[in-house]
């Protein structure tokens, strides 16, 4: 019995029989040495060197086997799952690697149905088929080596060679200068880097991330995400409903086929983005200009400073963010949102759409249709607005707000803390702050005007000429209300 740092080396031309290797013990079988009937318990190590022989091995859970598939090596026994395993004639079958166990698959040999558990390790220079990598198990596929149908379930596979039809349930596959084909990602992560290439990856859930000098070609994004980082390239990705394609600064994605509910997340600092929307419209981001981008279902376009967007379509669940010193022209909001910190020109807001003008942002010639909402925050500016029937305007008389436009009752404005001829309906709201005024406004169905006060006790003053059709007044103490017409 070997235990507690006990070690036995069986040298060439000798043998050992009926050996038990317990925790801390180690049995080493050298070239041309033999063992028969070895019990390998939890924490014990059996190392069979090239050309060694170990028959009738009984491997218990946690027992570590160290071996290779070098010609002349012979190992037979039962693994910790109760299945027969062997290494013979340059082939390994049903080997279990765990607890510092390792297997080296040499050039010209192969391993089939290996199980790699925690702290197990497998180095492949030949061919590997059907390996299962459980949590904290590792496998490396070296240049000129191949792996087929690996099942990654919490472990890590690093590919310098070729891996085909891997299934990543959890854990990670790192394509580092190698290549993969027909990988199926269903909860884990595939990372492509250092001139690695991933071809025809199917993403159901989880993540495919493309790093510097990595390329993904023909990925189908049904769920989960494909993320293209700086220096990475995605070619001919199919972005289906429920999937996300995220192109980051200095990343590139070309030839995208985007469905109506596929989420594109992008920045105008991307190197190049091209593709075709579900409606057949071509879109692009190049040299700081975004054109015809479709945003829906979690899609986001960030228009960075000193860049622009034109004709962005923002549907339900989509968002366009226009940063300071950026310009967006001709955006259409249909259930989506535009946040304006820079300048937005000629935005159309349809039912469910929201344009929010932040501090120091400016909206010019916004058209608000029925069911749409324009919100102007403190120090925001919105000019030449067209407010159609059923459109909602949400704002206040706060310092710095400047608003002008037309509606069915004529022109309206907010300037110098004075709101004039506002139309509030269908969720519209005007907050009249302390020491400010509102005159000649109309409160329609679903609209509300609030007169509030500050700690100095002065209230907002809602002046003569107000029209009250079917809305609600909400006055707090010290606010005054005069001349209301129903």
Image: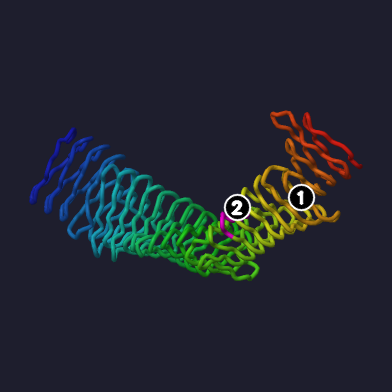
Asked where in the image residue 264 lies, by quadrant, the reply is: bottom right
Q: Is residue 1 visible?
A: no
Q: Residue at the spot x=60%, y=52% of the render?
A: 341
Instruction: Say which label, 2 or 1, has the lower sequence index.
Output: 2
Q: Is residue 319 magenta?
A: yes
**Quarter that holds the C terminus:** top right
Label at residue 303: none
Which tag is nearer the camera, tag 2 or tag 1? Answer: 2
Identify residue for label 1: 392
Q: Is residue 421 above or below residue 273?
A: above
Task: Name the one closer to the observer, 76 or 315.
Answer: 315
Badge 2: few (under 14), some or many (20 or more) residues near its Cα, within 10 Å? many
Give the SS element for disc 2. loop
Identify residue for label 2: 341
Q: Position of residue 93 (x, y in %)?
A: 30, 55
Q: Position of residue 52 (x, y in %)?
A: 15, 52
Q: Which residues are magenta?
A: 318-326
Q: Is residue 467 magenta?
A: no
Q: Residue at the spot x=73%, y=48% of the render?
A: 415
Task: Name the one closer to the observer, 436 or 105.
Answer: 436
Q: Is residue 172 visible?
A: yes
Q: Position of residue 368 (x, y in %)?
A: 75, 56
Q: Is residue 247 above or below residue 485?
A: below
Task: Name the one closer to the observer, 425 or 408.
Answer: 408
Q: Is residue 58 above or below residue 297?
A: above
């Amino acid at each position: 019995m070997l235990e507690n740092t006990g070690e036995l080396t069986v040298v060439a031309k000798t043998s050992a029989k009926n050996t038990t290797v317990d925790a801390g013990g180690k049995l080493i079988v050298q070239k041309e040495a033999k063992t028969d009937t070895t019990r390998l318990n939890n924490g014990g190590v059996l190392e069979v060197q090239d050309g060694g022989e170990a028959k009738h091995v009984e491997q218990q859970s946690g027992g570590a086997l160290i071996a290779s598939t070098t010609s002349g090596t012979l190992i037979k026994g039962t693994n910790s799952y109760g299945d027969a395993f062997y290494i013979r004639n340059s082939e390994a079958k049903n080997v279990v690697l765990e607890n510092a166990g390792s297997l080296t698959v040499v050039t010209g040999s192969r391993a089939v149905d290996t199980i790699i558990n925690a702290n197990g390790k497998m180095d492949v220079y030949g061919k590997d088929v059907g390996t299962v990598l459980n949590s904290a198990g590792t496998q490396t596929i070296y240049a000129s080596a191949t792996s087929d149908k690996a099942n990654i379930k919490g472990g890590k596979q690093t590919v310098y060679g070729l891996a085909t039809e891997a299934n990543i349930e959890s854990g990670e596959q790192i394509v580092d200068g190698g290549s993969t084909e027909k990988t199926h990602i269903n909860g884990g992560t595939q990372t492509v880097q250092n001139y690695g290439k991933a071809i025809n990856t199917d993403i159901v859930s989880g993540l495919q991330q493309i790093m510097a000098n990595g390329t993904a070609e023909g990925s189908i994004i049904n769920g989960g995400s494909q993320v293209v980082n700086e220096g990475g390239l995605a070619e001919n990705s199919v972005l289906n409903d429920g999937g996300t394609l995220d192109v980051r600064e200095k990343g590139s994605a070309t030839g995208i086929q985007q469905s109506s509910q596929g989420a594109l997340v992008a920045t105008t600092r991307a190197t190049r983005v091209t593709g075709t929307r579900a409606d057949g419209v071509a879109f692009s981001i190049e040299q700081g200009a975004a054109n015809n981008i479709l945003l829906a279902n979690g899609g986001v376009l960030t228009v960075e400073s000193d860049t622009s967007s034109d004709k962005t379509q923002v549907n339900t669940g989509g968002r366009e963010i226009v940063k300071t010193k950026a310009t967006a022209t001709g955006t259409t909001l249909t259930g989506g949102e535009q946040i304006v910190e820079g300048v937005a020109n000629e935005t159309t807001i349809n039912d469910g759409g929201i344009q929010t003008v932040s501090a120091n942002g400016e909206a010019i010639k916004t058209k608000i249709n029925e069911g749409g909402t324009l919100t102007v925050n403190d120090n925001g500016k919105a000019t030449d607005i067209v407010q159609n029937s059923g459109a909602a305007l949400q704002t206040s008389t706060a310092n710095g707000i400047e608003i002008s436009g037309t509606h069915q009752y004529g022109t309206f404005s907010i300037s110098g803390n004075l709101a004039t001829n506002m139309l509030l309906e269908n969720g519209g709201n005007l907050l009249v702050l302390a020491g400010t005024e509102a005159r000649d406004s109309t409160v329609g169905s679903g609209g509300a005007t609030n007169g509030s006060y500050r700690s100095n006790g002065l209230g907002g003053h809602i002046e003569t000429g107000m029209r009250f059709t079917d809305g609600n007044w909400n006055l707090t103490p010290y606010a005054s209300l005069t001349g209301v017409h129903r």
